[in-house]
Amino acid sequence: MNELVTIGIPTYSRLDYLKESVSSALAQTYSNIEVVITQNPHPDSSVTEAIAAWCREMANQNAKVRYHLNPRNLGQSANFNAAADAARGEYLMLIGDDDRLLPDCVEARLRVAQSKPQVVFSNYYLIGPGGERLPEATDALTRRRRRDRLPPGELANPEMWAWQRSVVLEAALIQTSAFQRLRFREDHDCPDTEFFILLARGGGRFVFTPEYVSEVRLHIRSSNTAGLRTHQLVGYLLPIQVSAEVEPYKRELLNLLTPHAISLCMLDGDVELARRILDSPYYPGSERRRLRGIVQRSCASLPEPLGRSVYQVIHRAKNPQRLRRNSS
């Protein structure tokens, strides 16, 4: 067990958290690692320069650290791809610059990767802005993603669990060649759901171990708190044909995502996708009868750009604070 493992950490604007993330990567009990930091430049040049100076200093001090400043802001998903593209290791871990790895994370994953699966994934803790663990939220998320029901070992039907979003990027050791072949789709900010589904559908082997190996931070500056833009994801998931065994989990996920996705479509002016989602069997029947569903269907049926304008007026009236946050 001496494979090189790359820990990729894309960053943008959170130097305080980045320092913790890099420190946790360098503190691994498994020594044959490299830490690759890829930075998207910030509109405020002082933010970019502060992060770049610290990263260069770390790279000069520690041969395990490599740093790359992207020529422009590639977006979140493309920045993850940039870290993976730079990877030299046989296996890859990708974590947010606000997340942390526990010391034995890599070593424990590698012990069960000797059969060369494409993914080894585990549980993770949720932590607050100051790094404090959130046990109730952690337990609730573990149950919601059904990892409490997952048997340890290689999964017989990994696609079924991928549709349930049981696999999480920040607690997954991924075969680098598999990631580089498939990559993240770069036009939305929640690409890992589709990535793991497609990897499983392509015959990827997934192994689960129940240990908690990393810490994912919840805070006001996280993309999850700001709100993920899921409408492109829904558009890519809708046409995927699945087996009868997997179909209930596809339906469950899309029933959850489609109402919000339609709102994002209407606000962005992608009325064609909104109509496609509304006409699909995955838009929940209960939502169709609610006021939001009636508004969505009525506005989507109007000619463009009238439908979008009407929806924006209604949305602004109902959500003035949210609209201002999303436009800032």
Image (tube, rainbow, N blue to C red):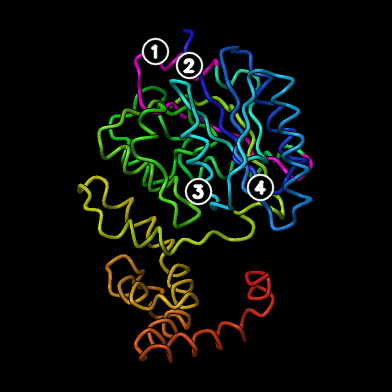
- In terms of image quadrants, where is residue 257? bottom left
Which tag is nearer the camera, tag 1 or tag 3? Answer: 3
Q: Secondary structure at mark 1?
A: loop
First of labels 3, 4 by sequence position: 4
Give the label on residue 12, or none.
4
Viewport quadrant of the C terminus: bottom right
Q: Secondary structure at mark 3?
A: helix
| Distance in Å between CA atoms under marks 1 and 2 | 7 Å
Q: Check disc 3 and report the residue beneath it.
A: 77
Residue 299, percent from left and from top: 41, 87
Neighbor class of circle 4 (other Cα within 10 Å; few <14, some 14-19, many 20+) is: many
* Left or right position of 32 against 26: left
Which tag is nearer the camera, tag 4 or tag 2? Answer: 4
| Distance in Å between CA atoms under marks 4 and 2 | 29 Å
Q: Check disc 1 and report the residue beneath it.
A: 114
- Specify the segment rendered in magenta: 107-130
Instruction: Tell me, yes or no, whether the two marked residues, 1 and 2, touch with CB atoms within 8 Å.
Output: yes
In the displayed structure, would residue 25 be above or below residue 134?
above
